[in-house]
Each structure stands twice: as structure tokens, then as C-alpha cells.
Amino acid sequence: MMSGTSLDGVDAAFVQTDGEQISSFGPHGYLDYSNDQRGILRAALGQWPDGPKVAAAAQVGEAAHIALARQLMSEQTPALVGFHGQTLAHDPKNHRTHQTGDGQVLADALDVPVVWDFRSQDVAEGGEGAPLAPFFHHACARFIGAEGPLAFLNLGGVGNVTWVDPGIAAPEAPNACLAFDTGPANAPINDLMLARRGEALDQGGALALSGKADERLVLSFLEHPYFKRVPPKSLDRDQFPNLSATVVALSDADAVRTLVACAAEAVAQAMIHCPSRPERILVTGGGRKNVALMQELSARLSLPVQDIDETGLDGDMLEAQAFAYLAVRVARGLPTSSPTTTGVERPTCGGRTAYPTRA
């Protein structure tokens, strides 16, 4: 189960896997946060476990995850649950990251073992703690029968890219994966829509399609020092706090289109770091439904850009499926990150397991 930085809701999905190969995908579901719930979660952004808004945010997140899990478990009972939780703060330079929610609460409520806290061990060992989906992306590339290198581009609140070589069997092996955050994606767009229009997002990119990007501001955005860093590297949701301020003088349509262009240009900059040219870029996450963003990606990249749904994978559920897959790897003691995905010194198995308590 996964709740992303876009603050839209909770995804849950079944995967049948041994933590290495994907056998099949099963039922899945989504639960939208209410505006009140989003407000509670948003108020806790940037806070660490002792923050004054964290307890309320944890209750919201746990309740939503439990409700969706029970809904899906009426169809099928899982052997194991992977629970990511809502990222509130991420500061790998100081070896800390914070995802709200307690796996023990879910394990007791669902009466199923729950693997959670996937990022802390990686950060403690000097890694970025993100992104964590790359090993799953590698398995997906093999599942769809890809032969040459591919890039998986996830456009959530923050964008992240995984370059994979499916010809290498183990994802933790040298040269099998390279992964890192590209830059802001949906988060600044959603924040602007909420602030200016009281809407959670620019549905389908409709407003951005009517606007024109200010290329001067896009070039200024690319001067941020993050883009000069060599990957692996990761971002907190609000690590570009001045981005929204740069578009304040623009109309709503032009402001949103400029933010869309910034997200796409960040991806273009990321492609420079790929070990070799990927055959295509498979786009997953909510950003793939933004027509303006997909147009900007096609215009700014010299690579085929494809909605991942066209391969038979589910771009809405990939992140949730990833944490089911990673949960099994944790249960088997297999690595969940490596030097080329998070920058950790050696392949690392992250995650804690909570077992249901018995009376």
C-alpha cells in the first residue's frame, strides 16, 4: 500500500511474487482522501515524529489504509502487507526520513504481518532512502519481456527515474539499475491549483494546455544546485520552495504550463546521467494523465515517451505494487536498495516487520 507525495489518496494492490520474479498481479483499489484529510496531512508536511501535527496525520493515514485494505481483503487474503505510509519529511544528508503511520497498528487491525519503515535503514547506512521502486521496475522490465535498457519515469508529487538493464538478472548487481529523483513534478502544480482555484489538481492538464510556458523562468529553475549533483540523489517534496513564487505574476494557465515545463525539463536533464540511451521511457504515476506534461516530455526529450499502461502494466498501481514486491524481499532478506539506486554503500535490506499481537 502506498500514499504518495501528491496527497491524492491511498493505493493498494496485490502482487504474486517471490521477491525476484513477478508471477502475476491481482486485485487493486484506490481510496481518495477527503479535502479535510488532505488538509490534516498537508499541515504535517515537513514535521518529524515529535511534530504537533504528526499524530493527527498518522491517524488519518492509518485509517485510510486500513479501510482500503479491508475492502480488498474481502476478495483475497494476503500473506504479507507492504505499508509505506505518507512521507512528511526527508533529510538524507542528516540521515533521517519520516513516513507517518505505524505498521503495528495495521498488523493488529488486519491480522496480517506488515512490512513497513522501508527507508530508515538505507538512510542510516548513508543512502538517500529514495527512490525505492527501482528493483521492482527491473522486475517489471523482465515481466514484459524487455530486452534492451528502459527508463521508468514516475511522475508523482516528485519525479523519479529508473534506468534498468533487464539483461542482468539481479537488480542489485552492478550496472543493472540507476535511479534518482528528477525534480518536482505534480506537487507544485497541485499546490498552485489549490491556492489559486481551490482545486486539488489540473485535471488532465486542461488548464496547462491553454497556457504558454515562460522559458526564461524554466531556464532559471534549472540553475538550482540539485541538477548539478551526480546521482543517486533524492528530494523532499518541498525542496524547491521558491518555484511557486517565480510564477506568481503569470496568469493561472501560464503559471501551470510553466510548472509543467519545469517538470519536463528536469526529466530531460536527468537523461544525461543514464549509463546508455534507453530504448524508450515508460511513464507511470498521475503525471502521465496530464496531457500537457506528456506533450512537454515528448517535445523536450529525444526519446520515445510512452504511457506505461500500453505495455500491460498499471501506471496507477505501480508504486503500491512495488511495496508489495519489496515486502517479500524484506521477508526473504533480499536487498531493497543498492549503491546505484540510493547511494548506500552496499546492497541493503530495509524495512521492519510487524506481526499481529495475540490476546
Image: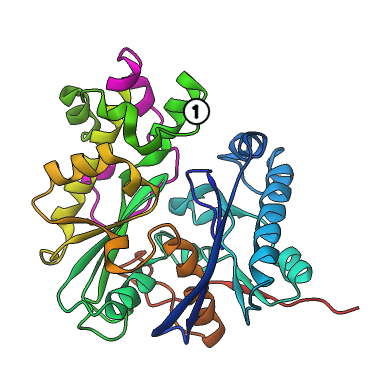
Name the side, left or right, on which 354 lies relative to 22.
Answer: right
Which residue sits furthest top?
A: 249
Nearer the observer, 85 or 324 = 324
Residue 120 percent location from the top left of the image: 54, 63
Q: Amino acid at mark 1?
A: Glu
Q: Quadrant of the C terminus?
A: bottom right
* Helix, strand or loop status at disc 1: loop
Residue located farthest toward the left when viewing the structure as drawn: 302
**Percent position of residue 278, x then y:** 14, 65
The reply to whether residue 12 is visible in this rendering is: no
Classify 61 as above or below 242: below
Magenta stretch in the rendered image:
226-254
- x, y (%) of residue 15? 49, 76
Q: Say if the magenta span includes residue 319.
A: no
Residue 223, relative to residue 12: is it above or below?
A: above
Quadrant for the N terminus, please: bottom right
How is the protein colored in the picture? rainbow
Q: Residue at the location (38% across, 68% down)?
A: 344
In the displayed structure image, the side of residue 312 where residue 121 appears, left or right: right
The quarter holding residue 139 reads bottom left
**Spot occupied by residue 351 in the image (x, y as percentages of width and height):** 56, 72
Disc 1: CA contacts within 10 A as few (<14), some (14-19) or many (>=20)? some
Number of disc labels: 1
Residue drawn 22% across the image and 24% down it: 217
Q: Nearer the viewer, residue 16 or 265?
A: 16
Residue 202 as seen in the image, left or right of residue 51: left
Q: Which residue is mark 1?
A: 199
